[in-house]
Amino acid sequence: MKQDPIENTPRFNAILASVDEEAEAELKASGGYHREMGYCHTFWSTKQRILKEKYAIDWKTPAEMN
């Protein structure tokens, strides 16, 4: 499975855990938190938006890479 090369950079790894937590919290607050089939796509798009808006990181989701 391919992944975005940005995932191998120190900057990305330094903020990864906090962005994952932020995306989960945002989805829970909006009622979009349902761990079922297809949830990963909602999570990835939320994570992608947070990375872009807050950190100016252009990250490609696993769906975009594969």
Image (cartoon, rainbow, N blue to C red):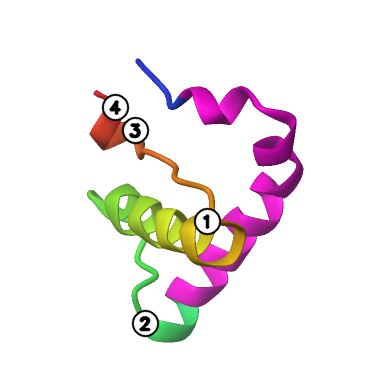
**Marks 1 and 2 in Cβ contact (< 8 Å):** no
Image coordinates of residue 37 in percent, x first then y, are 23, 49
Q: Residue at x 34, y 74 (%)?
A: 32
Q: Which residue is mark 1?
A: 51
Q: Which callout, 3 or 1, points at the residue further toward the start of the chain?
A: 1
Q: Quadrant of residue 34?
A: bottom left
Q: Residues within 10 Å of mark 1 (few under 14, many from 20)?
A: many
Q: Which residue is mark 3?
A: 62
Q: Which mark is residue 31?
A: 2
State left or right for residue 19 relative to residue 59: right
Q: Is residue 55 magenta?
A: no
In the image, residue 40 above or below residue 52? above
Disc 4 is placed on an element classified as helix
Disc 3 is placed on an element classified as helix
How many angstroms separate mark 3 from mark 1 (CA)? 15 Å
Image coordinates of residue 47 in percent, x first then y, are 46, 56
Image coordinates of residue 55 in percent, x first then y, are 60, 58
The amino acid on which the numbered mark 4 sits, given as a three-letter code, is Met
The amino acid on which the numbered mark 1 sits, given as a three-letter code, is Leu
Q: So how many labels did they put on this image? A: 4
Image coordinates of residue 41 in percent, x first then y, are 28, 50
**Marks 3 and 1 in Cβ contact (< 8 Å):** no
Disc 1 is placed on an element classified as helix
Q: Which mark is residue 65?
A: 4
Q: Residue at x 40, y 84 (%)?
A: 30
Secondary structure mostly seen in magenta is helix
Which is more foreground, mark 3 or mark 1?
Answer: 1
Which is more foreground, mark 3 or mark 2?
Answer: 3
**Marks 4 and 3 in Cβ contact (< 8 Å):** yes
State left or right for residue 17 relative to residue 60: right
The amino acid on which the numbered mark 2 sits, given as a three-letter code, is Gly
**Marks 3 and 2 in Cβ contact (< 8 Å):** no
